[in-house]
Amino acid sequence: MDNCIFCKITRGEIPCYKIHENDKYLAFLDLAHFTEGHTLVIPKKHHTFVWDVDNIGEYYSFAQEIVDHYRNKLGYKYVDSATFGRDVPHSHIHLVPHNGEGSDWESALVSIGDLQKDRDRWLSKEECEETQEKFTLL
Ligand SMILES: [Zn+2]
């Protein structure tokens, strides 16, 4: 993917603030951060969605190493995680560390709200039930 911004970061063509890396995955700071330490975790191989990544468990284990670090070493009470898949078309997991209080927490809530605004709509109860019926595996 020649024009993918995250592929360019992986190739070193665009700088980033790396947090963690191995041969398959890379974690770096999201400059449009929700909270201090807001991190993006990406596979080095291009996949559009998180759900397309080969060996997704390995991918999340890599993310977990970072979460463990934030919680156990840095003392964060929470590390919110999210995947939206509608902004940059290269798989990425958002990790948003916070302690559930103060301006960081409030700004995280506002930012997540802003990100979702106009992208999602609430389904009615009927639509939820129809969707559940259509998609359930039970
Ligand atoms: Zn890419």
Image (tube, grey):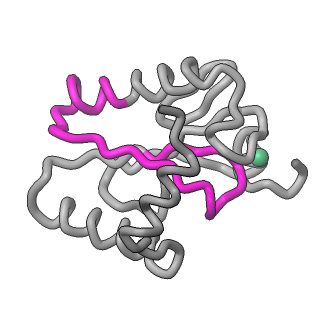
Q: Is residue 6 visible?
A: yes
Which quarter of the picture shows residue 91? Answer: top right
Residue 91 part of the magenta-drawn span: yes
Q: Is residue 137 above or below residue 83?
A: above
Residue furthest to the right in view is: 2
Left or right: residue 57 versus residue 129 is right
Tell me where residue 8 appears, x and y as whole percent. Answer: 77, 48
Q: Nearer the viewer, residue 116 or 138?
A: 138
Q: Nearer the viewer, residue 102 or 12?
A: 102
Left or right: residue 75 versus residue 52 is left
Tell me where residue 81 appears, x and y as whole percent. Answer: 39, 44
Residue 87 part of the magenta-drawn span: yes
Tell me where residue 65 appears, x and y as whole percent. Answer: 40, 22
Tell me where residue 133 appears, x and y as whole percent. Answer: 51, 50
Q: Is residue 8 above or below residue 64?
A: below
Left or right: residue 46 versus residue 20 is right
Q: Residue at x 52, y 57 (%)?
A: 131
Q: Is residue 28 visible?
A: no
Residue furthest to the bottom in view is: 118
Q: What is the span of residues highlighted in magenta in the rendered image? A: 67-94
Number of marks: 0
Q: Is residue 76 above or below residue 84?
A: above
Q: Residue at x 54, y 39 (%)?
A: 41
Q: Nearer the viewer, residue 38 or 92?
A: 92
Which quarter of the picture shows residue 113? Answer: bottom left
Q: Residue at x 60, y 25 (%)?
A: 56
